[in-house]
Image (tube, rainbow, N blue to C red):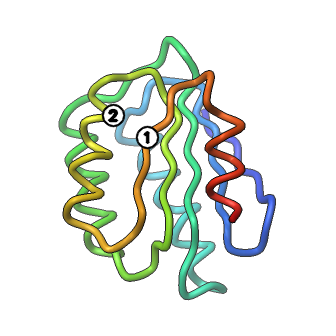
Amino acid sequence: MISKFEFSEQVVGILVDSDIDTKTLDEIHEEILNKLDSHPTINLFVKITEGHSISLINILKDLIFKLDHAKHFSKIAMVSDLKRMSSAMIFKDLVMKADVRAFENQERMEAMNWISE
């Protein structure tokens, strides 16, 4: 299950409280595309709650989506304790112009402050 929130015009905030399967990933991408309808560039904040995971195939699908829409992202913050997500975010930072950072759950407030700057 995902929840969406906004704390500024250009920031899309998504909270994920389930494993990220294909359906959940599609919902996340739909929220991003909806925001891009009214804003040419956005900052993206995603928090995956503890105890939930994402498969490698869905990490790759998300990477392809982000690369396809790379020019629309200014910043991406991922808050999760999943080590594979941290690794994926480091890779995304290398291949995207956007500033991409991974934060652990206890750094959530730091991530929110950074993404809204």
Residue at 55 percent across and 45 percent down: it is 46
Describe residue 88's horizontal placement relative to residue 26 as left or right: left
* Number of residues whose C-alpha sits closer than 10 Å to that of mark 2, classed few (under 14), some (14–19) or many (20 or more): many
- Could you tell me the amino acid type at mark 2? Met
Spot occupied by residue 57 in the image (x, y as percentages of width and height): 19, 38
Q: Between residues 77 and 61, which one lies in front from this camera angle? A: 77
Q: Between residues 100 and 50, which one lies in front from this camera angle? A: 100
Residue at 63 percent across and 54 percent down: it is 114
Spatial separation of the CA atoms under disc 2 and disc 1: 8 Å
Residue at 70 percent across and 61 percent down: it is 116
Q: Hey, which residue is sitting farthest right in the picture?
A: 7
Q: Count how many numbered circles sit on residues in the image.
A: 2
Describe residue 83's horizontal placement relative to residue 9 as left or right: left
- Could you tell me the amino acid type at mark 1? Ala
Which residue is identified by label 1?
A: 102
- Residue 34's tag is none
Describe residue 26's horizontal placement relative to residue 18 as left or right: left
Circle 2 — which element?
helix
Asked whether the residues under the numbered discs 2 and 1 touch, taking CB atoms below 8 Å apart as contact, a structural biologist would say yes
Identify the image quadrant of the N terminus.
top right
The numbered mark, 2 or 1, whose residue comes first in the sequence reads 2
Spot occupied by residue 61 in the image (x, y as percentages of width and height): 24, 51
Q: Hey, which residue is sitting farthest top in the picture?
A: 51
* Number of residues whose C-alpha sits closer than 10 Å to that of mark 1, classed few (under 14), some (14–19) or many (20 or more): many
Circle 1 — which element?
strand
Q: In this view, does 51 lie above or below 112?
A: above
- Residue 85's tag is 2
Q: Is residue 52 above or below residue 63?
A: above
